[in-house]
Image (cartoon, rainbow, N blue to C red):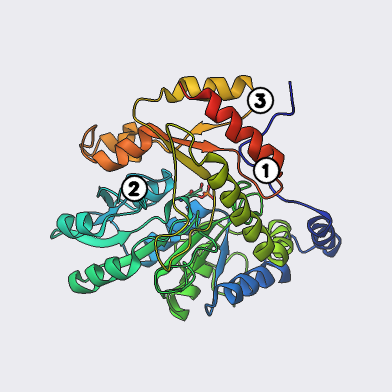
Amino acid sequence: MSERIPLARPELGAREEELVAAVLRSGRLSLGPVGERFERELAAWLGVDDAVAVSSGTTALHLGVRALGWGDGDEVLTSPFSFVASANCLLYEGARPVFCDVDPVTLDLDPAAVEAAVGERSAGILPVHIFGFPAAMPELEAIAARRGLGILEDACEALGAVDSEGRKVGARGNLATFAFYANKQLTTGEGGMIVPSDPAVAARLRSERNQGRAPDMGWLDHGGLGFNYRLSDIAAAIGVAQMERLDAMLAARDALAARYESGLAGVEGVKTLPGSLGPERRSWFVYVVRLADEVDRDATIASLAEQGIASKAYLPCIHLFPHLREFGYGEGQFPVAEAAAAHSLALPFFPAMTESQVARVCESLAGSIR
Ligand SMILES: Cc1ncc(COP(=O)(O)O)c(C=O)c1O
């Protein structure tokens, strides 16, 4: 059989090795200068004043929820078509996710559905820029302003996306989170970043990620409740190395998506997702296609696997997981999200993928539609 093509693979090289080795030699494995450098460089790249590094996208979301003061009895409007962490972060603080259906084209929160779901207990909106496509932030911000709601953007899949007003996702002044797991546009292995909305929030985030310590406090001094959500300097060193190549890696993802787009044109039963609909630009995180309703997705996945090609049903709706069904959610409530979940398929996608690998995936997929 020809070489197996995985779904994702991180881009790691000599520069990562060099910067990680430098951290090891320095003996400053945490709370050192490399962590601060990673924060500064990502903030500068985004065009924001500050960014706070944390241990994952999930912990970034958790601190964001706390910073907004969302807790017991509060309802937060969010997307059912997401990775489960965007709802779990609300549950950690006793807030309730109120799911609203998504737009059939962008697969992001539909502002009209959000508007219709705002109620007395609504405290905020948590939009998810799913698959790197920028959510309708101007519309959602208008609803939030009218109804007095806070906003936490889950940009964990969207580093490098540009919104309909030409701004990088995460740079609108809202709290916004990024994630750096190994399949992301930029990786630190495990890691995350939160863009604070102002300096006071930044100080709170830095304290809470570090067991409630203020910068001038000793190791056994704590000004309040906190967590160990720190990012190690070893992970940050990988991030700094990745920052140097971020633009090139994003461009490689764009080129790959374009190759898929032409390779899949005319393949019966397969529809590609848009990179853009107007001025906004998707940051290609995964390459997901929509199979026609009559296609047997499981059989297609099995056939691709036989040919050495990884693929995945992507994503399941999160309101249907057992712990969210406890809130009264069930099948049929969000038809657009549920249809997307039922018919979407992720294909191999990583910057080092070659032209011939993309061609092989496209050909195999065309022959695997059942
Ligand atoms: C939309 C979304 N939110 C949150 C997360 C959580 O990030 P992490 O896995 O780093 O905790 C992810 C990561 O997969 C994600 O895709």
Q: Mark 1: which amino acid?
A: Arg
Q: Identify the element where label 3 is drawn.
A: loop
Residue 354 versus residue 165 in the image, above or below:
above
* Mark found first going from the N terminus, 2 or 1: 1
Q: Residue at x 52, y 58 (%)?
A: 283
> Which quadrant holds the C terminus?
top left
Residue 78 in the figure: left or right of residue 42: left
Q: Mark 3: which amino acid?
A: Gly
Q: Which residue is mark 2?
A: 91
> Which quadrant holds the N terminus?
top right
Circle 2 packing at 10 Å, graded few (<14), some (14-19), many (20+), is some
Q: Residue at x 67, y 43 (%)?
A: 9
Mark 2 or 3, which is nearer the eye? Answer: 3
Do residues under tags 2 and 3 come within 8 Å of each other at their CB atoms?
Answer: no
Mark 1 or 3, which is nearer the eye? Answer: 3
Q: Mark 2: which amino acid?
A: Leu
Q: Which residue is mark 1?
A: 9
